[in-house]
């Protein structure tokens, strides 16, 4: 009982901090949208970003590249990535490095692989939870393998929020059963549920790899405020870089902070955060180039 109480307390504190920081970010972004509409505004913004050093707000670690689905709006539909798993030691290495800086942002085990296909996930989450008590652990999943038992196991391991994406018109039987069994209100609050199968308006074109009805045109981009690590250990530009074309280093060889603080990486992030698109992938992502 004491352990459950402790867990709830920790979850609520993490949840509160996470929501507060999301709201502050939303407010900042509203004013920034006006600033970056002109060339001068973008230059001022870049000058300001240059003078700041800040830590990444999220870390996404892909532990497996495998996905059981081939959704039509995902590059997994037609481009094969090698099947692979991140070496366990590499996952622990990143978590240890994050622990040294008492990381308190979001941590999510995913990129384009489905995390629940990796049987090691409960252990990996549990390790991360112990080492990063202040991090907000959010697990993105298509929900196909999220049975009630797995849900409870992962909750125990330390997941704060499950973000389930429904990719069929109907809710799958597995999810219906799991949601039905959870019952307890506090556990239901641990789930964010989103239907994706016909939501073309809000989908990104994945760096030009996917046809979308309407391109998402961004005035600036905050995707670079987080770190995306693929199963091979590459630190990538963002979660849109499916083909891992823009890598700034590999966590096998370097500390995550060393990579984050590299001059070329920082300078690129400063520009992207102010709507200065120098990379082809960003221009295509924004619908400027086709
Ligand atoms: S959208 Fe998600 S579930 Fe669908 S293929 Fe891509 S990674 Fe898999
Ligand atoms: S604009 Fe660039 S950094 Fe931002 S999401 Fe698109 S590809 Fe990624």
Image (cartoon, helix red, strand yellow):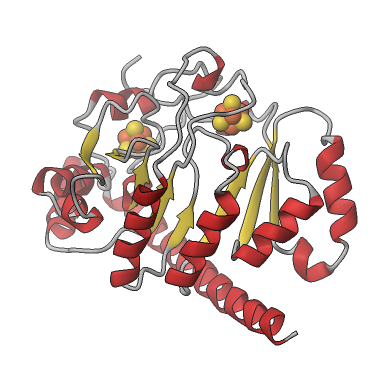
Query: Can the viewer see residue 136 in this picture?
Result: no
Rendered location of residue 247, percent (x, y):
24, 34
Q: Which residue is at a point 44% across and 68% down the rendered structure image?
A: 24
Image quadrant holding the C terminus, namely top left
Residue 1 lies, with reference to residue 261, above or below; the image says below
Rendered location of residue 258, percent (x, y):
16, 55
Residue 74 lies, with reference to residue 177, above or below; the image says above
Q: Is residue 182 left or right of residue 157?
A: right
Rendered location of residue 104, percent (x, y):
41, 70
Pick out the residue farthest to the bottom. 2
Q: Which residue is at a point 25% across and 23% down the rendered structure image?
A: 280
Query: Can the viewer see residue 76 in this picture?
Result: yes
Image quadrant holding the N terminus, namely bottom right
Observer-nearest of 53 and 242? 242
Please identify the quarter of the rendering in which residue 87 is found.
Answer: top left
Rendered location of residue 250, percent (x, y):
23, 41
Split into quadrants, the picture shows ligand 1 in the one at: top right
Q: Is residue 248 left or right of residue 159?
A: left
Please identify the quarter of the rendering in which residue 152 is found.
Answer: bottom right
Q: Is residue 150 left or right of residue 41?
A: right
Observer-nearest of 72 and 149? 149
Observer-nearest of 169 and 129? 129
Q: Which residue is at a point 32% across and 28% down the rendered structure image?
A: 244
């Amino acid at each position: 009982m004491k352990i459950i109480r402790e867990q709830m307390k920790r979850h609520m504190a993490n949840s509160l901090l996470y929501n507060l920081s999301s709201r502050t970010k939303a407010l900042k972004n509203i004013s920034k949208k006006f600033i970056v509409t002109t060339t001068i505004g973008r230059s001022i913004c870049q000058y300001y970003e240059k003078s700041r050093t800040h830590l990444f707000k999220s870390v996404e670690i892909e532990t497996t590249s495998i996905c059981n689905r081939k959704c039509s709006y995902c590059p997994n539909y037609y481009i094969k990535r090698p099947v692979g798993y991140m070496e366990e030691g590499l996952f622990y290495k990143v978590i240890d490095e994050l622990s040294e800086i008492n990381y308190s942002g979001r941590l999510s085990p995913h990129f384009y692989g489905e995390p629940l296909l990796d049987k090691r996930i409960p252990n990996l989450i549990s390790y991360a939870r112990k080492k990063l008590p202040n991090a907000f652990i959010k697990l993105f999943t298509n929900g196909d393998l999220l049975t009630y038992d797995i849900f409870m196991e992962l909750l125990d391991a330390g997941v704060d929020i499950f973000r389930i994406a429904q990719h069929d018109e109907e809710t799958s039987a597995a999810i219906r059963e799991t949601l039905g069994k959870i019952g307890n209100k506090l556990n239901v609050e641990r789930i964010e549920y989103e239907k994706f199968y016909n939501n073309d308006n809000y989908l990104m074109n994945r760096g030009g790899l996917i046809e979308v009805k309407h391109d998402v045109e961004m005035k600036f981009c905050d995707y670079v405020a987080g770190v995306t690590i693929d199963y091979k250990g590459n630190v990538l530009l963002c979660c849109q870089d499916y083909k891992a074309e823009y890598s700034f280093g590999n966590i096998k060889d370097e500390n995550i902070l060393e990579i984050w603080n590299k001059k070329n990486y920082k300078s690129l992030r400063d520009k992207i955060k102010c709507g200065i698109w120098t990379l082809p992938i960003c221009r295509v992502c924004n619908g400027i180039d086709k």
